[in-house]
């Protein structure tokens, strides 16, 4: 499956946090090749996708704030990562254009 997201190695903390305020529009334990996946609609045409989660802390319909913990990811497995995508509508965007380094 072609995607334009980035894979982020977990730091010491297992917490996955929302990049922006929004509403959870999708939450599934086993979504295609993505595994446990959360999709947040930010209300301005942008969606963010967080996949490869170990434990999800929210559910569809929940409102989230920027920096709020939405999931946990394994930190001990060197082959584990968070898959992160930004989409404008259904069109994948280059996440590096939107994220600060």
Image (cartoon, helix red, strand yellow):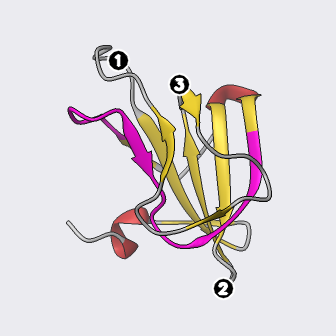
Quadrant of the rendered image containing residue 82:
top left
Split into 4 quadrants, where in the image is the C terminus?
Answer: bottom left
- Using the image, determine if residue 32 lies above or below residue 79: below
Quadrant of the rendered image containing residue 92:
bottom right
Tell me how far mark 1 sits from mark 2, CA to CA. 34 Å
Q: Nearer the viewer, residue 28 or 80?
A: 28
Q: Which residue is mark 2?
A: 44
- Of the numbered discs 1 and 2, the one sitting upstream in the chain is 2
Q: Which residue is mark 1?
A: 79
- Using the image, determine if residue 54 lies above or below residue 49: above
Q: Residue furthest top?
A: 77
Tell me how far mark 3 sits from mark 2, CA to CA. 28 Å
Tell me how far mark 1 sits from mark 3, CA to CA. 13 Å
Q: Is residue 21 magenta?
A: yes
* Region rendered in magenta: 8-27
For the image, the number of numbered tags is: 3
Disc 1, SS: loop
Label 2: how many Cα within 10 Å (few below 14, some 14–19, many 20+):
few
Label 3: how many Cα within 10 Å (few below 14, some 14–19, many 20+):
some
Q: Residue at x 56, y 28 (%)?
A: 55
Q: Residue at x 63, y 75 (%)?
A: 42
Label 1: how many Cα within 10 Å (few below 14, some 14–19, many 20+):
few
Q: Is residue 89 magenta?
A: no
Q: Residue at x 39, y 22 (%)?
A: 74
| Mark closer to the observer (3, 2) | 3
Residue 10's spot in the image, x, y percent?
Answer: 30, 34
Split into 4 quadrants, where in the image is the N terminus?
Answer: top right
Residue 54, label in figure: 3
- Using the image, determine if residue 67 lies above or below residue 84: below
Q: Residue furthest bottom?
A: 44
């Amino acid at each position: 499956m072609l995607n334009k997201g980035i894979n982020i190695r977990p730091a010491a903390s297992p917490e996955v946090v929302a990049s922006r305020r929004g509403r959870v529009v999708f939450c599934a334990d086993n979504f295609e090749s993505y595994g446990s996946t959360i999709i947040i609609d930010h209300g301005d045409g942008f969606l963010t996708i967080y996949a490869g989660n170990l434990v999800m802390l929210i559910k569809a319909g929940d409102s989230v704030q920027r920096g709020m913990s939405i999931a946990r990811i394994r930190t001990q497995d060197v082959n584990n990562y968070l898959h992160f995508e930004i989409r404008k509508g259904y069109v994948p965007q280059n996440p590096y254009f939107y994220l600060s380094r």
